[in-house]
Image: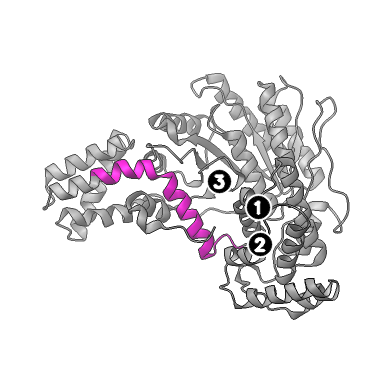
Amino acid sequence: MGFFSAIKKIFGGEPGEAAPGTVAPEGSGPVAPAPAAPAVAPQGGASETAPESASATEAVASSASPAVAAQETALTLRLREAEPRLSVWLGIVLEGVEETGEALRQRLLFLLRALDAPEAEAQAFVRDFEGWLARMDYRLVEEFRSELQYRLALALDLEDEEDERNRLFVKISEGLSRTREQLARGLDTLFAGHGELDEAFWEELEELFIMADLGYEPALELVERLKERARKEKITQSEGVRELLKAELEDIFRAPRRIAAVNPPEVVLMIGVNGVGKTTTIAKLAHRERMQGKKVMIAAADTFRAAAIEQLQVWAERVGALFYARQAGSDPAAVAYEAVERAVKEGVDVLFVDTAGRLQTKVNLMEELAKIRQVLGKKHPGAPHRSILVIDATTGQNALSQVKLFKEAAGVDELILTKLDGTAKGGVAIAVAMQHHLPITYVGLGEKLEDLRPFNGADYARALLEAPSSSAPVGR
């Protein structure tokens, strides 16, 4: 999406028009306004490299003092000579800027202009970011630098560039450190104690997988798959199993192709038990969509906990999404129905529908979720377009039972695995993918908005099996 079209979609008109206000049905409780902001995307998309346009530099220089113009000319030369990576460009323009203020504002505008961003849209991006800084009460650049780079990567459609992929790999590697420590130590001991592949080796490997929280059945299946792969590839020594395991994990996590096209608005049903991080995950997903130029609404259909509505409202304000809610105790299906109706009227691109998260063993919860799905489909054909189950990596085998019950009762299209950082039970991702054949689309690696990252099976396998020295950080 280009700069101009992105800002029109969000503001509902020309750049500079008032942002959409609060969305709430009659009879609902008060909801806060959610400021909108545009995505910023250079013409040409992710293939943009070092700034090439002289006109952008000339426009900046003509309106600046001689000293500032000279400084910006020097910065332009450095940008043109620098390695074409977002982290490098950002490092150059932020040199000497330590806290929020006019200097930061001008440097960010300079970078966006250097990337040929139209002036109105560059200004809108910076205004949105400054609003977020004020709400979060950040002052020092080092407190929010990684968030700024993340926003720019999303807005500029640069998330797939090598620098961002390396940053993601480092985060996943750090998140899996406890799981890797346990598994890698066991693998090293196993490989050192066995030369030839024999039954004793495979039995010990199965035990090792069970200890990594794969569970009995997935561990047994994985060992059988490795045996077959070793036979086909004529691997006879234990050390060769490490690469076989990496390749097998990549196959396990390979997501099937699916039709991405939807009849707007795209309705995303968010499900999961209390405590898994569902509310913050919704906020992070909404943030990603907002930074990519989409108009987003969040609907609070978990009406059984007043706190759930309030928390979701706060997050909607932080990420600049529209918010729809009724008072606590309202019929969740009715809230979902009305939210879709309002989303259609407002020209929303993506609607996230939160749902209740009482224990998955409660039959009435599953019946309620099924009702919400039926109501959504009746109101908006094809909805929900995606049903995302959020599970907590730290719960280990309990996550498997959650997936089974939710999949049977309410339908699940994809999984998001939260709290992967700091757990020794990261192996549950393998078990879930093997047993339920559902794609893991994102993983939660921390509390910040930037800490929800796309899941990549190859990166997960590397991070789980390779030594930490092979995942040195790249960029900031």
Question: Label 1 vs label 2: CA separation?
Answer: 9 Å
Q: Is the magenta stretch mostly helix, strand or loop?
A: helix
Answer yes or no: do the residues labelled 3 and 2 have beta carbons within 8 Å? no
Q: Residue 25 carries which label?
A: none
Amino acid type assigned to the residue bearing label 2 in the image: Leu
Q: Which mark is residue 452?
A: 3
Residue at label 1?
Answer: 141
The secondary element bearing badge 1 is classed as: helix
> Does 329 sit left or right of 86 as displayed?
right
> Does 387 sit left or right of 361 as displayed?
right
Residue 40, image quadrant: bottom right
**Would you say residue 179 is visible in this rendering?**
yes
Q: Is residue 332 above or below residue 97?
A: above
Answer yes or no: do the residues labelled 1 and 3 have beta carbons within 8 Å? no
Q: Is residue 229 above or below residue 415?
A: below
Q: In this view, does 112 lie above or below 248?
A: below
In the displayed orientation, state which residue is furthest to the right. 17
Question: Label 3 vs label 2: CA separation?
Answer: 25 Å
Precedes in sequence: disc 1 or disc 2:
2
Q: Where is residue 150 in the image (x, y as percent from the top left)?
A: 61, 54
Precedes in sequence: disc 3 or disc 2:
2
Q: Which mark is residue 94?
A: 2
Residue toward you, 49 or 111 = 111
Q: Where is residue 36 in the image (x, y as percent from the top left)?
A: 78, 48
> Does 63 sit left or right of 113 as displayed?
right
Q: Is residue 312 above or below residue 122?
A: above
Numbered range of the magenta stretch: 158-186
Q: Which residue is drawn at 79% across and 74% down?
A: 69
Answer yes or no: do the residues labelled 1 and 2 have beta carbons within 8 Å? yes
